[in-house]
Image: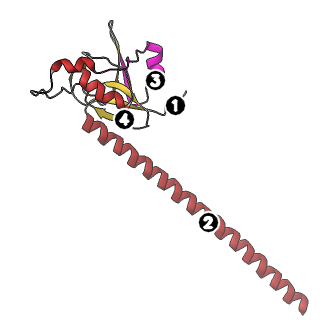
Amino acid sequence: VIMRYTGSLVASEDGETTRYGLFNTQERGNMFVGPQTPVYEGMIVGENPKNDDIAVNPCKKKQLTAIRSAGADEKLLLTPPIIFSLEEAIEFITDDELIEVTPKSIRLRKKILNNELRMKAVMKARREAAKYYNERKNAFATDMIAKAFFIWKLHFLKFFLTLALRLYNAF
């Protein structure tokens, strides 16, 4: 099994993707969805080159003022989205991700959809991993101290026996 060293770009809210939202999101990594695609919180919309997951909002709308117009969104250049086959999606996902297969699409999502609950679960897993690491490190240190003490006792015993033999041979 090949381990993936990249993270995911995860949608932070429900809605339909916009060109403006995707343009700002594509700076963070490769996208898996195009404009006007319905997304929901917890859906994976892209790949983060770093190992962490990032919550992004591809549904963000541009603030329209007298100076800006809605037609300016058409000028934003988007990179084409990566479309996975089922086999590619299976290879891509990690332990905390799932694949949704429908007749019209293949979508990737997190097991825990809510961003806040997902972050709490990640932090809990990191704390448990750190606790396990520290326990192993302490057990290793204890073992090394016990071995060093045992070796010290052997050297002390050897020294004591050598001294006793010298004293015995001296008389």
The part of the chain drawn in magenta is 77-100
Label 2: which secondary element: helix
Q: Is residue 88 left or right of residue 110?
A: right
- Looking at the rendered structure, the kind of residue marked 4 is Asp
Residue 89 highlighted magenta (yes or no): yes
Task: First in sequence, mark 2 or 4: give its number.
Answer: 4
Q: Is residue 47 above or below residue 141?
A: above
The location of residue 20, given as percent across then percent down, is: 24, 24
Label 3: which secondary element: helix
Q: Is residue 163 above or below residue 9?
A: below
Task: First in sequence, mark 2 or 3: give its number.
Answer: 3
Q: Give me the disc on residue 3.
A: 1
Residue corresponding to mark 3:
92
Label 2 or label 4, whichever lies nearer to me, is 4
Residue drawn where x is 38% and y is 49% of the image: 127
Q: Badge 1: few (under 14), some or many (20 or more) residues near its Cα, within 10 Å?
A: few
Q: Is residue 127 left or right of residue 149?
A: left
Marks 4 and 1, Cα distance to the nearest angstrom?
15 Å
Label 2 or label 3, whichever lies nearer to me, is 3
Q: Give me the disc on residue 146.
A: 2
Where residue 81 sits, quadrant-wise, is: top left
